[in-house]
Image (cartoon, helix red, strand yellow):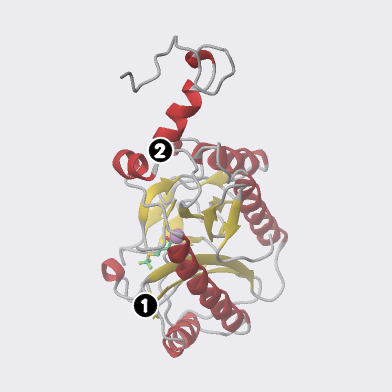
Amino acid sequence: MKTKTGRNDPCPCGSGKKYKKCCMGKAAAESQSSPEALLKQYNIRLKTPEQIEGIRRCGELVMRTFEVVRDLIRPGMLTEEINRAVHEFTLANGARPAPLNYHGFPKSVCISPNEVICHGIPGDHALEDGDIVNVDITSILDGYYADCNQTFFVGTPSPDARKIVDVTRECLRLGLEQAKPGNMVNDIAAAIQAYAEGRGCSVVREYMGHGVGLDFHEAPSIPHFRSRLGNVPLVPGMTFTVEPMINLGKRDVRVLDDGWTAVTRDGSLSAQFEQTIVITETGFESLTPFDL
Ligand code: MF3
Ligand code: CO
Ligand code: CO
């Protein structure tokens, strides 16, 4: 008995067309997006509905942590005081802060002011009127990870501060608009890059979004610029972050001697927004939602 439809056989869908002119392409696309194929080809772990619910619950805690943080953002506040508040609120809610001791990171949250792109280490630095500051929170609740960051104004923003924060928020919104089955990671990346560069800003290349949920950083990488890495299909059940880092000046990065703090080489302002999302049948759901 013949089990496989040949390319020139009539299509099993009954259209009367040859298989190769009809459903063959769709079958290939489907086999490339099966859980087994995604795992083998890209090391992507599709999540079950139960796992997605676990990540969603963790995301809810992360968003409640941001309410605590938002109330602390003001001139004179030390970044270490924000770190302590995040640490204590996370533990009080039965979770753990993922950054603490992650590859040796010494604190419970990343706090990145002004020209710091990401991975700023909280300490005795005092926030000042006119600063922008990114706070990046990742919690582990019942073994599930959710990762989210937002950039805040401290006091009254300068025109430059307003511009880089507005451009970066819009980059995340436009990137997420492309997050749906049938699209590729590169569709997200291209939307972000086109908008940022069109506004005269630049996209950081060294740090990317990432799969997330069962671990802090999973496959695939989610570049925010067109790249061979972005040649990955978006499939329902994929959970990952989109987290564009956009510089007001040039894109080049320098890492300080602490081994973590990434700053713009030209000293220009840098902003970032991040959400953890799941791809659904019709688009995406944010598991760490905030208005964009
Ligand atoms: N939260 C960051 C991200 O979005 C990763 C921080 S790693 C740390 O991927 F060690 F610096 F915490
Ligand atoms: Co992340
Ligand atoms: Co993050």
Quarter of the image holding residue 73? bottom right
The residue indicated by pointer 1 is 107
Q: Is residue 286 above or below residue 107?
A: above
Choose between 158 and 56: the one closer to the eye: 56
Q: Residue at x 47, y 38 (%)?
A: 233
Q: Residue at x 52, y 74 (%)?
A: 62
Q: Nearer the viewer, mark 1 or mark 2?
A: 2
Q: Residue at x 45, y 90 (%)?
A: 92
Residue 104: x percent and y percent? 27, 70
- Quarter of the C terminus within the rendering: bottom right
Q: Is residue 68 above or below residue 55?
A: below
Q: Residue at x 65, y 59 (%)?
A: 165
Amino acid of disc 2: Leu
Residue 170: x percent and y percent? 67, 52
Crowding at mark 2 (Cα within 10 Å: few <14, some 14-19, many 20+): few
Q: Is residue 209 above or below residue 145?
A: above
Horizontal side of residue 286 vs 155, given as left or right: left
- Quarter of the N terminus within the rendering: top left
Q: Respond yes or no on whether mark 1 lies under 8 Å from ligand 1.
A: yes
- Label 1 and label 2: CA atoms lie apart by 30 Å
Q: Is residue 63 visible in this depiction of the protein?
A: yes
View extreme (top): residue? 8
Horizontal side of residue 169 vs 44, given as left or right: right
Query: Quarter for ligand 2?
Result: bottom left
Disc number at residue 229? Answer: 2
Callout count? 2
